[in-house]
Image (tube, coloured by chain):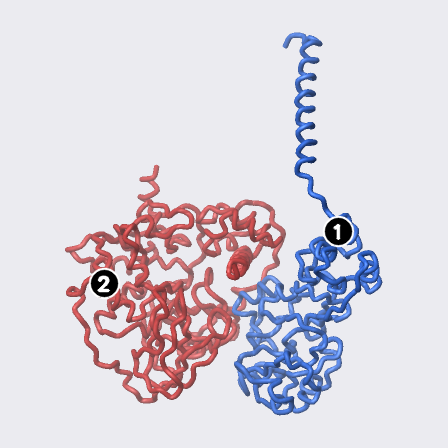
Amino acid sequence: MGPVSIGAVLTAVAIVGGVGVCFAAMIALTHRKFYVWEDPRIDEVTGLLPGANCGACGQAGCRAFAESLVGAAAKPALCTVSSPEVLEDIAAYLGVAVGEANRRVARLLCAGGCDAAPPIADYRGLLTCKAAAAVNGGGKSCAWGCLGLADCQVACTFDAIRMNPVGLPVVIPDKCTACGDCVVACPKDLFTIMPIEQRLIVQCKSALEGDEAERRCRVACTACGKCVMDAAPGLIEIRDGLAVIDYAKNDLARPGATARCPTGAIVWVEGSQFAESPKLAEALA
Amino acid sequence: MMMLWNRRLQFRHGVHPPDHKELTAEVPIRRLPYPDEVVLPLRQHTGKPARVTVKPGDHVERGDVVAEPDGWVSVPIHASATGTVESVDPWPHPDGSWSPAVRIAVERYSAQAARARLVPEWQTLSPAELIAAIRDAGVVGLGGAAFPTHVKLSPPKEQPIDTVLINGCECEPYLTTDHRTMVEYPERVQLGLRIMMRALGVKRAVIGVEKNKPDAIAAIRATVPADVDVTVEALTVKYPQGAEKMLITSLLGREVPSGKLPMHVGVVVQNVASAATIAEVFDTGLPLVERIVTVTGRGVRRPSNLIVPVGTKIRDLVAACGGFTEDAREVIFGGPMMGLAQANLDTPVLKGTSGVVVLGEAEIKPRRSYPCIRCGHCLAACPVFLNPQLLGQLAMKGRYQDMEAHHLADCMLCGCCGYTCPSNIPLPQLFALAKSAARRVKAPA
């Protein structure tokens, strides 16, 4: 290559610089032309929200929730992750009331740990519930029951799920934000998100009835119907081998409905599940 | 170059697992006494489950319809024994779920004779009538996937079929169902093939059998009819030679494009046992109520080839083979490469169950899984030319959409990659999970 003249360098700089200036001008113009005004409060509120993007409020993420807050389409209390103080701050900033949210938690519809529903086959393979469920259902005696390999615990962003000694996930209500990640993670579809005041819960999903169900799990719902008789009329009905509670009539629910349950499948939950259920403890004893 | 491939009659890639067929290859098929109870799940075939037509308490004769097809890709289910319907309730299904099944208490001391029925001469029936008769007999592919046979025999008009392939490879280790069918009932295979050729209006057929079954090849060759163009080819012994697409490559040198079916290259592939069953339908008029099952492995005392009613439980099968040995550890429906492990001995044999393999402790010794060393053995084994190493890494990260982009849909879960992996990475299990996750995502949309 021969020597490069300074003139050629200057020409190149001028051309590239000129092109740059042209594009800069175009970008500036486009920015003016297509500028969309956005409420600056949205950014502020997004900053106050926890940024977990869990979706428990029903929005796609924290920013989407902030937009609906600023648009007065939602109340701050719908964010179940923020502490009450933060909610107060948001409400004060926007000049609205905190509002009432009905507090919801994840509940496990199975009480059959490895003591109540022992495995009938020895599963060897990837140690996740999803993988085990794909190999002949996981080898548990009850085909509907919890496999106890903690996919839900792994999925939980808020550290709200702990496995108990019999291999059942215990949801800590104070930490649970009802985001629903565990519902998606469970291959047996055992989790459900429900309002915390729904205290009467049938902790079983087995479609089997009577002795068939009990033979496979000591705490299975046998569809005997005793709870139906003990509860307010119409609150509980037997459907497909299970007692099904009509939560529209939740006001009528009383702990008495669990009194005669032979297996302890129906329980009255105050706080977290599997914690203080004498009926269940008795069934397992 | 292509001609050279064809002359060796094989496909590229694949693995050579020990076949263990010596356990039952020489054992003649024997008929099992009827069990006390048979269980017929309504979901026995690919497609929509059948709709039940009986209720508890009904008396059924062997061969009576107990469930009718629901839609085109569905077949009826017939009582496999004379008796009384006990219940129509959930029952353990080989896939691990509990799904609705018709339980029949088999009548003691019954002759188990089928009702007298009219069996038309197949030569006098039109293709449409033949296909309808095959459907009414509940015939599905007996190789394992249980795809309704009548659907395969009714290709759309724009897909002309020029060749019928009969799959007698039986490349899965242990299984000898097809082998014994060819040795003992070669005329049935030939008759079933002729009926299928008539139904499809096809003039040419090829029967492919792996070279490790010389007696089957001889029996089939000896019965080839002189008036139609049927050739018998001995194929290289390699797994998965019996996979539909591999077989087409080996025998015809045609490649089925990704996402397409054999009919798109003018081929229909049927299993030898399916052909034999079709022959039986037009021979005796009896629908698909029994099948040949290999019960084998180091975990049973007396490995056997059995004719059993569809719906016989594992428990009864194993009892008929002398029971479990002390170190029996794992029961598999189908072969060890692609079969389904079973957890419940009450699970019944379905129409598509070609064998029950019981493995001993020594054969299933759990081995630790190590990190991938990128040796590339899996790439050299994958018969559909995927990159199992990459797919495995994506699967472990849960990146199922990226797996789709790398043609996960072409994976048939043959298990070659997992078999050959020196790090014991459970690749097929990861892929099976990814496939079911993809189905879950697609289902709600």
Question: The C terminus of chain A lies in which quarter of the figure?
Answer: bottom right
For chain B, the rendered hue is red
Residue B274: where, in percent of width, then height? 31, 64
Q: How crowded is mark 2: few (under 14 residues within 10 Å), some or many (20 or more)?
A: some
As displayed, is residue B442 above or below residue A212? above
Tell me whether the residue at label 1 lies in contact with that at label 2, contact meaning CB atoms closer than 8 angstroms: no
Residue B173 x, y percent position in the rendering: 42, 61
In the displayed structure image, the side of residue B332 where residue B210 appears, left or right: left
Callout 1 amino acid: Ile
* Placement of the N terminus of chain A among the 4 image quadrants: top right
Circle 2 is placed at which residue position?
B128
Which amino acid, by three-letter code, is at mark 2? Ala
Answer with the quarter of the image where residue A85 lies: bottom right
Q: Which residue is drawn at 60% across and 49% down?
A: B372
Q: For this rendering, which residue is in front, A6 or B424?
A: A6
Q: Residue at x 36, y 85 (%)?
A: B106
Chain letter of the blue region: A
> Where residue B435 appears, x then y in whole percent?
51, 57
Helix, strand or loop at label 2? It is helix
Judging by the rendered image, the residue that carries numbered circle 1 is: A42
